[in-house]
Amino acid sequence: MSSHALHHYPATGELPRWLLAGFISGFISVLLFHQGMAAALHTLGMTPRAPYSLQSTAPWGIPQMWSLAFWGGVWGVVLAAVLGRLEGAALIVAAAIFGALLPTLVAWFVVAPLKGQPFAAGGAPQAMMIGPIVNAAWGLGTGIGLALFGRRRAAA
């Protein structure tokens, strides 16, 4: 196995770039992948929630779309930190799985109760499947962003 195939965590000098790329990739992925998938699901009648909402969020009144994008960036940093040893297709697949699971579980069991909403989308199967789908799309986009822009490329 070549040393390139077994990539180590980004070198210390590369770590800030890697984490910043995680934030930027996560932020942009919300706008393109997460909300794009939400738009597709809304169009298919699978969710009543319209994408790209500018409705204010509590407590600061930030439009929902920008709040989601910010938190997508924060999750992008977490994803980058957790999956820093991966690259290429392995990174992208693991990022999609990470997205489907971790942000969804936190939304169901931490965020929803804090907002006075029921755990796990109230246990309704159709509502429960929306989170993993849109969050897997976010993870896919974040993984692609990290794979493309997270590491410096060697000069040819």
Image (tube, rainbow, N blue to C red):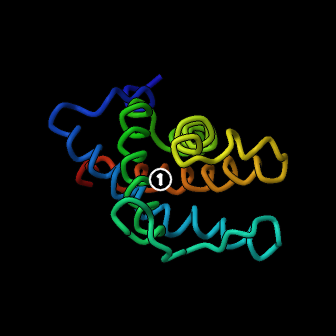
Quadrant of the image occupied by residue 11: top left
Q: Is residue 45 above or below residue 109?
A: below
Residue plotted at (43% across, 39% down): 79
Q: Nearer the viewer, residue 2 or 74?
A: 74
Does residue 11 appear to the left or right of 5 in the view shown? left
Location of mark 1 (residue)? 142
Q: Is residue 110 above or below residue 75?
A: above
Q: Is residue 94 above or below residue 54?
A: above
- Please name the residue shown 43% across and 26% down the image: 6
Q: Residue at x 28, y 34 (%)?
A: 10
Residue 93 x %, y %: 60, 42
Q: Quadrant of the C terminus?
A: bottom left
Task: Give the side of residue 138 with respect to residue 119, left or right.
Answer: left
Give the left or right position of residue 139, taking residue 77 as reference: right
Identity of the residue furthest to the front in this view: 116
In this view, the residue farthest toward the left is 13
Give the residue at the far top of this rendering.
1
User: Considering the numbered disc 1 on the image, is that residue within a helix, a strand or a loop?
Assistant: helix
Q: Position of residue 104 (x, y in %)?
A: 61, 42
Q: Amino acid at mark 1?
A: Thr
Q: Position of residue 24 (x, y in %)?
A: 34, 58
Q: Hey, which quadrant is residue 80 in on the image?
A: top left
Q: Quick one: 112 or 116, which is closer to the camera?
A: 116
The picture places residue 115, in percent across and down from the top left corner, at 54, 48
> In this orientation, does residue 90 appear?
no
Can residue 104 be seen?
yes
Q: How many numbered marks, from 0 up?
A: 1
